Amino acid sequence: MMRPDLLVIADAERDRRAFSNARIAWIAAAAIVVLVLSVQPFRDTDVWWHLALGRLITTSGIPGSEPFSFLPAAHAWVGQQWLYEVTLAGLFGAGGAGLASLVMGLVATSAVVLAAVSVPRSARVSGPWLGLAMVLTGVVLNSVVGVTSTVISVLGVAIVLYVISRWREGHTAALWGLPPLLLVWANMDAGFTAGLLIILAALLFIRPISAAPSGARRMLAVALGLSALAVLANPMGPELYASVLAGIFNPGVAQSLVGFGSPNFHDWSARLFEAEVVLMIVLWTVSGGPDRFSAVTGFGLLIATLFAQENVGILAVFLTPQLAVHSGRAWDLHVGPRLRQRSNTRRRRPHPVATSGVLLAMTAAMAVVLIPQLTPSAAAAYQASTYPEAAATYVSANFPAQRVYSIDAWGGYLAYRFPKGRVIFLYDEAAVFGDQALQLYLDIDQLDPNWVHVLTSEDIHHAILPSDAREAAALHVLGWAINCYDASSKSIVMSSPPPGAPLPQSGLVIPPPDAPAC
Amino acid sequence: MSSVAAEAVHEQRTGLRARLDSMTTPSGLFLAAVLVIMALPVTRTIQDPDFWWHLRAGQLLIQHGGLLGNDPFTYTVANHHWTMHEWLNEVLFAVEYAIGGLGLIVLILSAVTWFGLMAIVQKARLRNPGRVALGLGMLVAVIAGFPIWGPRVQMITFFFAMVTLLIVERHLAKGGRAIWWLVPLFLVWSNFHSGFVIGLGFIAVILIAELIGGRWHMPDPAPRAHLRPLLFVLIASTAVSMINPNGPTILLYALGTQTSGAQQSLIEEWFSPSFHDWEVLVYGAMLLSLAMFIVANRRIRARDVALVLVTTALSLQSARHIALFVGAATPVYIDQLAMAMPRMRAGIRHLRRARGAARVRNRTQPPFAFRLITSAVLFAGLGGISLAWLVPKMTLQPVSLAYAQEFPVCAAQWLASAPEPLRVFNQYGEGGYLSYALSARGDRVFIFGDAALMGDPLLYSYANVETVTPAWDSIIKSAGTNIVLYDVKTPLADVMEHSADWTKVYQDGLSVAFVETDQLATLQLPPVPHWAPGSVCAKQAKAAPNSGAQNS
């Protein structure tokens, strides 16, 4: 028979294990939901030129200049994201678009899980709060994740948060993982700067617990210094920081790239982000307030997101542990005591068998939802309806090696389809093309007074366009004819008229009645 | 003089002296200077393109002696019923214009906006925030609202909304019967602008917030006894709002704009604010610093939370609602700033001590006479600056270079010399001016700024032409357009320039006009004018003097 004091210890140990198991079950259930929300088709139009570049790097190394466009790029190609591009090309080659989508979805999910487990253990946040915070983050992330390098930064931030959380509790060994992390991260996405700034904020504003080894702060400073140096092991070398800053403060970039603009709060996704931020501020207010690190980093990331909506993902991941901790704290302060007054029934934890059953059912449901999305036929159907696949095939068959104008959003796809011969116009890599090339594009896209001159001077005689694009109507006025129409992606191929051909006397009709299918 | 009277005079003098003494302290001077400076950003020339059709509508209302029924300005939706929710305002515009020209309207609308800001000051003062916090908060608020201020009809709604919030707050804090003044206020407001619904919404939000806040034990709740009269006032105000030429439908009218997909997606002032725009930066800074203060102080009343949340959501959705955010959130901002200031001062003291810079500060004031003279000089200077700022805005005539660079003043003069009235396809923001200048002649425009009257289908059609979608040509022609008058260097103008089907007939520094080539002879348009040297249009046309126009 056990002694009474040992019985108490055994009870506490059992309680701790049950608490821990329940947390794991909630995190696993939430991760399944987040994975379903994070697996996306090739929605981000930039994925195609990254893919084309990844293939090129695999065969010929990092190019020294912009490799696809006939426009003169202002800056040398430095391939800062070469590792992301090679990885993407590898995934695509191994398992097609489905595998790339699945892996990037898993990366996003891992980020959310890591962010959730970066809650300090001392906070004793229960599973439901962690699960809810994760699902909310997954819903907010839904509009920004997918096959995009932003996901790498989302994961990077989550790892940094986890390491800082461990360091805060006295575990300094994890700090030495930061320099290699930043080394890899800087070669995949420019969002590594967020990681460095978060570490800096931790250094300035967090005091590790008293049990931490002496010199813990110094170790963090050294890890930060090493990380800042490690990112220089990049094709850009020491110019990396200047390049990132130039990208942030270039007003042209904000105008031409949606991700670098302020959120549009007419969209439900921006409203979700707004709701999450409001919830966070309310929770901080009613639960005793955030610590200085959380407040400074949270507001800093909020400012960054109001300037560039691309940062929504990083902010959402940062807020995950905050939401979990402060929801739990607010509940314990304001709602829990009242409920306890009303009923004295002890909270029961679900039986492990029931928990496992629920998790199994959720996994099966996830498989039912995800597997059809990941098949080659689903990817092909998405590609054919979203990108000018048929139009590009028509151009490659009928106008080989001839220059083609297109909108910038389709420029990346055309780079993937026409990786050789420099026949395409411009795609969304404004930092390399520079202001002059961007202006040439805008001249045509915005129909500035110079637009006809640009077409002539750049010797452009063919175009692949959305059928409702303003360029299509404008080119029709100049007498350009429609060669073919693709009803699936609603795209057209147009060509310039022979010299002396009469100008049309009526407007463009879409769908064009006489044009053949592409 | 009896001793009682002498005592009264002495008391009066002492009171005046005390007041002057208080006003001439650095904080008093700061606050007073802010209140004067507030007048500068709210005083501008007419920049709202809708102003012109409001003015013309007012003139027509007086001419007809009643509401107009259908749209009098367009050839596209002339059969649409016009809910003239701003009829009283439009009539007043016409009267003011007849009495004192544009100058009087600019003066009155600027004053109305300033009084709206003063209502914010009065509301904030109910919480005794201290002058520095009050002055700083108002300064931030006035700069934050900079993109919105100016002589425009919405400022009437801003003023009424601020007065409503002041009266409600005063009632919740002190009680009394003054709250019933809201009923006649809503009667007038609902005839001025459909934005009165915002006022009703504010009261409803405050009521609900206080009821919930009371249950959740939030700080400084309003006494329950004060909530019941507010509910009755809300009901009475809603009822009197319907005493309006448009009847009860006016209540639903404002909701129409908020739910119209076309208006929200096509009209610039309904877009979300872009924080890359420097004019919006201070609004962003105010929003973020308010959130920081709330998190740091952790003490906020239920009604303040509700008003801040509602107006934040509205202002993030549409930049035009920044004025509402400024109006509703500024008193909260000042209150939170006042709460945070002791901590900020302590922080600064701590920093100083850490740097070893602590020293005993002598806070003795300069002599009263010196302060009085300095204040007088300061206010004379500020008054002079304000006058120098206001007078040029007031004296600007409709046919002036400033307006000719913003609105198609010269093109309208040219069109006015056409032998027959014309159906003009126009830029959305210029329909108001063209209606003002040409509707008396019988000319009609394609579209003007009353988006609700235009309706979503016409807005989408217009957007298809503006963005030069393939249907642009057929939309213009099928509407029965005689002439297209558009801004130079726009996609539409550039495409028409290259089209064989259209011929350029006019161009100045702002506008360019095209007609269908086969209609050129039929329309008998006047030749391209040769503006008198030195005239407004000669100066305006300098940028592109009729280049390439083919009917000269």
Image (tube, coloured by chain):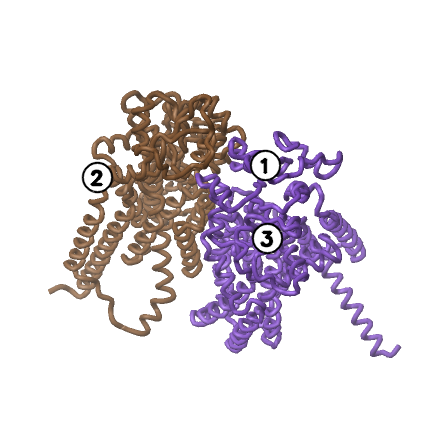
Name above or below for residue B84 compared with residue A227.
Answer: below
Q: Position of residue A329 (x, y in %)?
A: 36, 60
Q: The residue tagged with tag 3: helix, strand or loop?
A: loop
Q: Position of residue A274 (x, y in %)?
A: 43, 53
Question: What residue type is disc 2 on?
Answer: Ser
| Residue B22 in the figure: left or right of residue B483 | right
Find the distance from the CA under tag 2 to the CA under tag 1.
56 Å
Name above or below for residue B199 compared with residue B484.
Answer: below
Q: The residue tagged with tag 2: helix, strand or loop?
A: helix
Q: Position of residue B231 (x, y in %)?
A: 51, 74
Check disc 1: other Cα within 10 Å, few if <14, some if 14-19, many if 20+.
Answer: some
In this view, the residue in front, A327 or A471, is: A471
- Determine which of the numbered discs, if any, sits on residue A377 in the image: 2
Pinpoint the chain carrying mark 1.
B
Q: Nearer the viewer, mark 2 or mark 1?
A: 1
Q: The residue tagged with tag 1: helix, strand or loop?
A: helix
Find the distance from the CA under tag 3 to the CA under tag 1.
24 Å
Name above or below for residue B530 compared with residue A398.
Answer: below
Q: Determine which residue is flagged by label 3.
A: B73
Dot 3 and dot 1 residues touching (CB under 8 Å): no
Work out whether mark 3 precedes mark 1 in sequence or the reverse, and give the earlier one: 3
Name above or below for residue A373 compared with residue A47.
Answer: below
| Residue B446 in the figure: left or right of residue B115 | left
Question: What residue type is disc 1 on?
Answer: Leu
Q: Determine which residue is flagged by label 1.
A: B520
Chain letter, brown in picture: A
